Amino acid sequence: MPRAVTLIRSSSLSDIAEYAYASTAPAAARLIFAAGACPLDEAGATVAVGDYAGQAAQCVANLRTALKDAGATLDDVISTRVLVASHSQKDLVTAWEVVRDAFGEHDVPSTLMGVTVLGYHDQLVELEAVAAVLDD
């Protein structure tokens, strides 16, 4: 099935960013707005308490499930936002590296943000995403 998402890289901007600077989807694409994926297990408990990488991995796993239920995969994601409850850049980078590695070569435009607090007890990471698919 053809992909709806086109990643755009700019030769006019720094190549230091580990993601495409923009992305597009055709007007015929169905957009999927995923709720922020949280580091929760099937029972609703926060996993990997105190572990930024572990929570980021659970967020990615939960995002994969939500996307699958909506008829999409990580390769259909058009943008992400990674929220990390920390004032330390090191913690943000730790979470980001897990998300970046999960997306592999599909390096979608992303925003990495440090925030003061997230919604669940002991939650350190949340992953928002928008996807675009072409239905048959």
Image (spheres, rainbow, N blue to C red):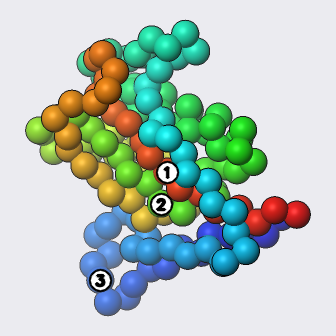
Q: Position of residue 112 (x, y in %)?
A: 29, 52
Q: In this orientation, does residue 29 appear?
A: yes
Residue type pointed to by label 1: Ala
Identify the residue position indicated by label 2 in the image. 79
Determine which of the numbered discs, if any, sits on residue 129 in the image: 1
Image quarter in which the C terminus is found: bottom right
Q: Position of residue 20 (x, y in %)?
A: 44, 71
Q: Earlier in the sequence, mark 3 or mark 1?
A: 3
- Give the vertical position of 73 relative to 16 (above or below): above
Residue type pointed to by label 3: Leu
Image quarter in which the N terminus is found: bottom right
Q: In this orientation, does residue 105 appear?
A: no
Q: Are marks 3 and 1 in contact (CB under 8 Å)?
A: no
Number of labels in the image equals: 3
Q: For the view shown, which residue lies furthest in the bottom direction?
A: 12
The residue drawn where x is 39% and y is 74% is: 21
In terms of secondary structure, where does tag 2 sit?
strand
Determine which of the numbered discs, if any, sits on residue 76 in the image: none
Q: Position of residue 125 (x, y in %)?
A: 34, 33
Residue type pointed to by label 2: Ser
In terms of secondary structure, where does tag 3 sit?
loop
In terms of secondary structure, where does tag 1 sit?
strand
Q: Is residue 58 left or right of residue 18?
A: right
| Res. 13 image quadrant | bottom left
- Give the vertical position of 77 relative to 37 (above or below): below
Q: For the view shown, which residue lies furthest in the right direction?
A: 136
Identify which residue, 39 or 34, lies in the foreground.
34
Determine which of the numbered discs, if any, sits on residue 13 in the image: 3
Q: Position of residue 32 (x, y in %)?
A: 61, 54
